[in-house]
Image (cartoon, rainbow, N blue to C red):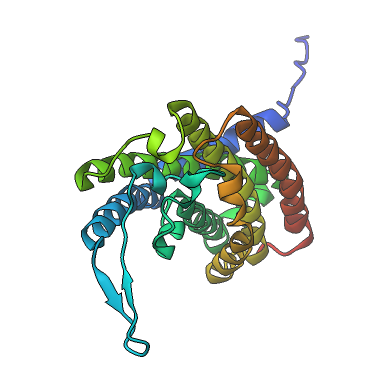
Amino acid sequence: MEAVKEVQFETNGFKKRLKSMLKVDFRRMFTTPLFYIMVGISLVVPILILVMTTMMSGTTTVNPQAGVETPMTGFDNVWQIVSSVSGGDGASAGAGMDMMAMCNMNLIYFATAVLVCLFVADDFRSGYAKNLFTVRAKKTDYVISKTLVCFVGGAGMILAFFIGSMIGGGVAGISFDLEAVGTTAGGIVACLVSKILLVSVFVSIFLIMSVVAKQKLWLSILLSLGVGMFLFMMIPMMTPLNANAMHVILCAAGGALFAVGLGAVSNQILKKTSLV
């Protein structure tokens, strides 16, 4: 008699499930127009800001009621659109026009909210999420995958904004002098790395808002932008233009803690609520 062969079923472990989930999400991220549209906007916005503010610099606006003239000032240095210097005169280098305090790289964190909300809401609106959880993936895998993929997307937008700033500065003829704003090349690198690492903090927050709202895109965006506004003033302190290794470490640690802690919250929300 022939020996009966033992049938072994391959276990679908956490590592294999997560790898499969990441593969699907990265494919979706890089094969759909959403990511490229957001990156394109991130590239073009700093060019427009630098060119337009330079063109408007020196003009005045008049308050028709009070008759007071307010001079418009543009960016004196291209690095001002990246961030501000913590302490010293550099922090107020661009304070001549209140708009300049908002028109910098920190806007990308709000753009990341739109990216995360659109990416997650599409899963629930199409029924993909419900089918995914029913067939193969666990909610923990979903949260980890979405956090990592959206972090990469946000980091790409940060880099696109930085490249756009360099292009815009060259087109507008603005100074690139580092000493004028009180920083160094090392400070710029540390600032950029800190901003990228800080993306994970905001992605974790936006992911919670997205799984709460699910297919209601408008609600997830409103919740994300609302919570993001409370944290907006934290960004210049955590990622100044004269950043150092300590800022990088703090942003990395904060990003890891938020990703783990808020990721666990997102996982519980998915377990306790309906998927439709």
Q: Position of residue 217 (x, y in %)?
A: 54, 67
Can you say which quadrant of the picture contains the C terminus?
bottom right
Q: Residue at x 50, y 48 (%)?
A: 91
- Image point (60%, 32%), residue name: 248
Q: Quadrant of the N terminus?
A: top right
Position above or below: 102 against 63: above
**With 48 as the anchor, is 144 left or right in this view?**
right
Give residue 179's position: percent from left, percent from top.
40, 33
Q: Residue at x 35, y 52 (%)?
A: 37
In depth, the one of 44 and 59 nearer the eye is 59
Q: Is residue 84 visible?
A: no
Percent position of residue 89, x then y: 48, 46
Left or right: where 173 falls relative to 177 = left
> What residue is at 66 percent from the left and 46 percent from the top?
143
Q: Nearer the viewer, residue 181 or 208?
A: 181
Where 131 falls versus 20 (above or below)?
below
Q: Taking the image as drawn, is residue 114 in sight?
A: yes
Q: Quadrant of residue 198?
A: top right
Furthest-bottom residue in this view: 65
Count of numbered tags: 0
**Where residue 175 sits: x, y (%)?**
29, 40
Residue 142 lies in quadrant: top right
Nearer to me, 77 or 225: 77
